[in-house]
Every structure is written in C-alpha cells, then in structure tokens.
Amino acid sequence: MIDLTIAQTNQGLKEGKFSATELTQAYLDRIDQTDDKLHSYITITKDLALEQAKKVDEAGDFSSPLSGIPMNLKDVVCTSGIKTTACSKILENFVPPYNAHVYDRLLDAGAILLGKTNTDEFTHGSSTEHSYFGVTKNPWNTEYVSGGSSGGPAASVAADQCAFSIGTDTGGSIRQPASLCSCVGLKVTYGRVPRYGVMSYGSSFDTIGPFAKTVEDAAIVLKAIAGKSEKDATTPDVPVPNYTDFLKEDLKGVTIGIPKEYYGEGVEQETADVINEGIDVLKKLGAEVIDISLSLTKYAIPTYYLLAKSEASTNLARYDGIKYGHTTDDAKELEEIYMKSRQEGFGDEVKRAIMIGTYALSAGYYDAFYLKAAKVRALMKKEFEDAFAKCDALITPTSPFPAFKIGEKADDPLAMYMADVLTVPINLAGVCAMSIPGGFSKDGLPIGMQIIANQYKEENLFHVGHAFEKATEWHAKKPNL
Ligand code: GLN
C-alpha cells in the first residue's frame, strides 16, 4: 500500500481494496520501522491520524483525490494543538493556537496528518544539520545528508513514510532535498499558495509546496492548496487550473531552453552529464531545445543571501523570549531577557542570519548592500522574463552535486551556501520550478533535474516533468532501508 501513488491509492480506497485506517496504520508501521535510521519525523500524530482516518472511512466518500491520503507537514507549518517547533530550541515546546491555511485546505480535502517533519532551524540551511533535534539522514545512504532545509519531508517521501509532504522553499529548500533524496519537489510561483500560518524566513521569497512520489501526485496536491486566500494579501486572484489536464506523454510544440551558466563552474561533471542525458530524452519526446543565456546567474548567491537574511533578521525579531517560546531563567531586567533568551534559543545559522541581515539593513550600509541587491534582483527577474519569451521551460540540474557526507560542509557556511547556486535565482525572480528524479551518480546517490517555468505556469512544469517521468525509470527506484 505504502508505495502506491496518490492516484493509485485513491483508486484502491474507492474500490474498497483497503480502508483509510488500514492505509494509515501501514504508514505508521513504516515510520516505526524506519525512522530510527532516518529521523525524518519530529512529532508523530498517531492518535489524530487514526481518528481522522476513521472519520474518512465512516463517511466513505473518496470523491476528493486526497480523501484518506496520509501526509506530513514540515515543522514550520502551524497546526492547532500540535507542537510546531521550527526545529529551534526557542520554539521547542510551542503549540500554535491556529492552523496554517494550507493545513486547513488539506484537511478540507480529506488528507490525514501523520506528523511533523524535520528542517534546518527556521528553514535556514541546505542539509538539515542545523536542526535543533539533529540531522535527517539520506535514505539512499545514511552517512549522507538528506539536503535542506526540508530534509524531513524529502526523506519521508523517498522512504515511503507518507504519501506526500508539504515543505517550504525560500531559496531551494524543497527542490534541493527532493533532488538529493529522489522525489518530486515543487517550488510554486510566489503567491500561488497562501503563507498564512507558516513561519517566515524571507517574506518576499517564501513559498509553500508539495513533495510527492510522482509529478501527477504533485499536481493533485497543488490543486488542493493553491489559490487566493483572504488571509494572505500576497495571493492574487489567478485561477487554479486542473493541473492533471496537462499531463501529456509527448513534448511536441514545447520549446526548452538550456541556460549554459547552470552547467559551468561549481557544477560537478557527473551531475551535468546526467542532466544532459535527460535533455536527450526530452528531445526524443519531441521538444525543441534551444540555448539560453542567464548572464546574471553569477550574482545570485550574494544577492539572495543579502536579501533573504535581511528579511529573516526582521522576521526573527518577534522571538523575544516573552511573546513566544523559550525564556531564559537567568535575567533580571527586560533587555537581558531578550538578549539571553535569543542567545540561548537560536542556533548558529540563525544567529548568522540575524547578524548579516541587521548589518546589511543598518542605516550606513543600506544603499551599499540591501538596495544594490534589490536592484540586481529586479534585473534578474527581467532576464527570466526575456528567457520565457523564447521558451516554455528551462532545464538545469537542481543541485551542483549529489548528497554530501554528514559533517562535510557543516563548519563552512559559504560552501553550504553554494549548494543553492542553481535554486536561489528562481526565488529571486519569483517564478516556479520543480525538481524530479533525473538519474543517479556512480555511487548510487540521486541526481535531480530542475524544470523552471514562468510565473503561474506550473502546468508547463507538470507537462515536461510527466513526459520525462513516463519515458524514464528513475522515479520508480526505491532506497533499500
Ligand atoms: N539554503 C538556503 C538558505 O539557507 C535556502 C533555504 C530555504 O529555501 N528555506 O537560505
């Protein structure tokens, strides 16, 4: 049961081959058997899951494709009455009083919550090594990282510990771990999914999207969570299409751009070779392939880290030891409470964000850093617009290299930031992208293919991704646990 896709599971439930309760129990057993090795889950909501499943079985209505489908949420998505920690000591025991809008939409669709999954603290990172609760390991080789920040969601989907998961992507946190663990990870257009109730990293970058076993499954989940929300003013009233209508098996009439800057310096040859083989598959499916140049790519890392950490430094200001979370035992007056609670509650990478961001925003440096980076961002956005005047989608590797060893980059923040070199430009431009299984390294580690499309063109991602998936076997390979 647990290796079925959402579409197949829905069919099984409709035909009465198994009940939602049996299905939920099977996933809970799987978590039980494998999570000691992986550590994807921070909280397992067993009783709630079985209760939700029972209700679905009693109602017996499987007309919604997500009815009775077990999932998990990254632990920055607020769930009323259930601990939501951001994997930070500062929120170690935080229980939100309300649900994120995305969780409410999934509940309305009939989905079942198995638990909350691991992330780098407040989603800052690319390896899940910055989680206060410890690293999530890669299901393909547990000496390697699962990627990040959504390491828990990615590993849990790749290891069949859920049918799908919801993560967040500010600079690559859905696509990069999906690439490192071999599953589908979708970073939507900025504004496509409401952010209400999801803890912020950088508010002008943050997006919410699914991890799934197939492209079709990602399309099904997106349909349930996308669209305007009264609770999030950054969600415009753009219609939500039936994304599954775009799942075709050939690419006739589709133009695909190859931005050469995404295959150059810093990208491992083996990774580039795997993606180039993938491009040959797309050609065989009928796509026209053209060369594109995105010449500003080299500025993406400094531009992103300046802007995102600046936004983060203001978003993290709310954790003051009084309104939420951890309060120091060791302070006599107000200012000391703020300082000591934050000093004790935040980990290194989050402190780094606060320092970089506060510095870049300070009066004397604002023009030199923040404003300049904001201008570069506008130029990068324009460069993507020009590219999408010529093609329907771009194809690149998702990550410059496959999973790295746990500890390998932990003490070198700049080396860690380079893991995002191929994903952050997409968040700077606000367009959409998806990572799909694209192949494996000679050491048996997954390599993801990134498909990028213009704003509100998620259907192009699904079209290209589905056709590639149907023509290859990579998505069907499973880790041995
Ligand atoms: N690794 C990147 C960062 O630390 C991206 C994180 C994310 O997308 N949340 O900023």
Image: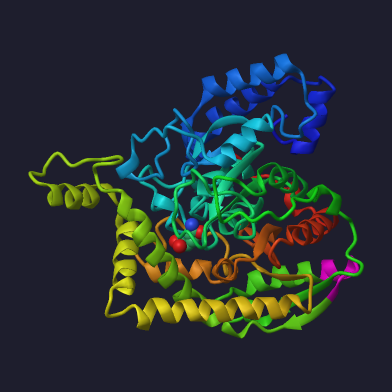
Left or right, residue 212 beside residue 297 = right
Residue 384 quadrant: bottom right
Residue 177: say if magenta: no
In the picture, measured across the screen, residue 355 lies left or right of residue 32, that is: left
Percent x, y of residue 32: 53, 28
Q: Is residue 338 left or right of residue 37?
A: left
Give the quarter of the image for residue 13: top right
Quarter occupied by the N terminus: top right
Q: Is residue 374 left or right of residue 133?
A: right
Q: In x, y percent, where is residue 259?
A: 69, 79
Counting from the top left corner in percent of width and height, residue 410 is at: 38, 60
What residue is at 18 percent from the left and 53 percent from the top? 339
Query: Which range is magenta?
Result: 280-288
Q: Is residue 161 visible?
A: no
Residue occupying the point 39% across, 48% down? 131
Q: Residue furthest left?
A: 332
Q: Is residue 461 above or below residue 388?
A: above
Q: For this rendering, which residue is in front, 340 or 120?
A: 340
Query: Residue 434 is drawn in which quadrant?
Result: bottom right
